[in-house]
Amino acid sequence: VPGLGMFGHGRTLKDAKIASDVGEMWIEAVRGAEAIGDFHPLSKADLFPLEYWSLEQAKLASNKPKPLTGQVVLVTGGAGAIGGATAKLFADNGAHAVVVDLDAARAAEAAKKAGNGSIGIGADITDPAQMRAAFDKAVAVYGGLDILVSNAGAAWEGRIGELDDATLRKSFELNFFAHQSAAQNAVRIMLEQGTGGVLLFNTSKQAINPGPKFGAYGIPKAATLFLSRQYALDYGAHGIRSNAVNADRIRSGLLTDAMIASRSGARGVSEKEYMAGNLLGQEVTAEDVAQAFLHQALAERTTADVTTVDGGNIAAALR
């Protein structure tokens, strides 16, 4: 492209880089030939046996792309249990994952575990400037963005009438405004691309069925659930889908081993019984939540949805 440079195209970032390398070598070959005479490419008949074209065609036919091949997903809180599992599952299904976490080293480690050319970015997602920079870097590395998994969050405890304003505001910054900032940046890119996109939010059981002394966490999460629906309403005409996952009792940085021991002890049950305290009688894992996010990303006719991943809890059911 005159004045810009050369664009490499491929199913994956690796394929695109290979195409670019071939293109650069082609340019050098043409320049070298024209320096001493004229350049004349080989005919298709000559290329056919040289490139073993029939074998290449067979390889291409057998190499079926994965469902998210060529897509880019950005995951906030990507170094945590749910974020890490989600980044890896999406990468396993062909996507390039951009793992964003406050801890840059852990983000890089999670990206390495995810594989498929994924990258880690350290950023404070409550800082709008850092959030925008993270999204811009994703575009600079991969050329665009297709999916957002807005997952990061943390809980503060205390009876709502006794919480100081600073604590409640801090929770809203992380558990609501950071989701809004992530979605705004994703939509900014998706609208410019004009190819649609997917916004996915981790809203938690607390958004539907609040627990005692968890108002500081549940209230902004409830607002985030409606945020997800608002994006579905406002940007559906642009092909941008917006969905949420409502999960409960997932071993993570939010629900630690110490918290599990405390809560199970208070209820007079074992830790195993507490974690499997649902209709199915089975513990729900971070990988189960990741599967829900993947389903929502692939369900092309689904938007404004809330998928429950808790093993069955009627009190937290939407309908």
Image (spheres, rainbow, N blue to C red):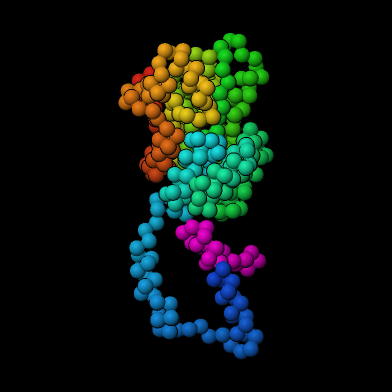
Residue 307 in view here: yes
| Residue 46 on image: x %, y % | 43, 84
Residue 294, horizontal then vertical, whole percent:
42, 41
Q: Is residue 297 left or right of residue 179?
A: left
Q: Is residue 179 left or right of residue 272?
A: right
Residue 191 magenta-highlighted: no
Q: Which residue occupies the foreground of this view, 239 or 49?
A: 49
Q: Which quadrant of the view contains residue 101? A: top right
Q: Residue furthest top?
A: 161
x then y, percent, for residue 38: 58, 88
Q: Residue at 63% of width from left, 38% of height from top? A: 103
Q: Residue at x 52, y 26 (%)?
A: 256
Instruction: Name the foreground residue: 110 vs 194.
Output: 110
Q: Considering only vertical position in the picture, is 151 above or below 315? A: below
Residue 8 appears in the picture as rendered: no
Magenta range: 1-20
Name the residue nearer the viewer: 213 or 196.
213
Q: Residue furthest left?
A: 280
Quarter of the image that includes the N terminus: bottom right
Q: Position of residue 122 (x, y in %)?
A: 63, 41
Residue occupying image coordinates x 45% and y 29%? 250
Q: Quadrant of the C terminus?
A: top left
Q: Judge whether 275 appears above or below 164 on screen.
A: below
* Outermost residue, front side: 270
Question: Any magenta on residue 9?
Answer: yes
